[in-house]
Image (cartoon, rainbow, N blue to C red):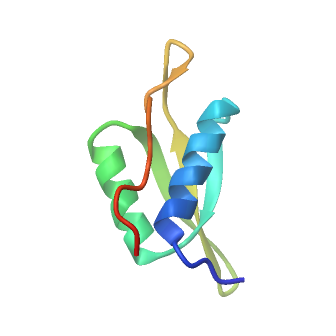
Amino acid sequence: MSISDPIADMLTRIRNGQQAKLARIEAPYSGLSASVLDVLKREGYIREWRLLEDGNKKSLEIELKYHEGQPVIHELKRVSTP
């Protein structure tokens, strides 16, 4: 299945994961998504991310970050669209 907007999909997964208080989430891999995750990690919004490979399928494992039980990211939305 192809995702038409992988960035919006990843941001939605992060937002939903934090609402559910999950420690980790997975998202489909794209080079642009990995670059966005690099910025989120550098700025302190996520703990870590890893590239997972299962045969020819790639995905991103994202460790979410919390402070005193509350998500570090308070609001997350896509501003521009493809």
Which residue is pictured at 35% across the width and 56% down the height? Answer: 79
Residue 24, by quadrant, is top right
Viewer-closest of 12 and 49: 12
Residue at the image point whose x is 52% and y is 72% from the top: 5
Image coordinates of residue 41 in percent, x first then y, are 35, 46
Q: Residue furthest bottom?
A: 56
**For the point 56% across and 46% down, which residue is it?**
14
In this view, the residue in front, 39 or 74, is 74
Q: Quadrant of residue 78?
A: bottom left
Query: Residue 22: image x %, image y %?
Result: 67, 35
Is residue 77 found left or right of 25 in the rendered image? Answer: left
Q: Is residue 29 left or right of residue 24?
A: left
- Residue 82 position, x and y percent, is 40, 76
Drawn side of residue 61 relative to residue 82, left or right: right
- In the image, is residue 25 above or below residue 65? below
In this image, 69 relative to 81: left or right? right
Residue placed at 44% from the left, 35% from the top? 75
Residue 35 picture quarter: bottom left
Seen in the picture, residue 12 relative to 66 is either above or below; the reply is below
Residue 10: percent from left, percent from top:
54, 59
Quarter of the figure that contains the N terminus: bottom right
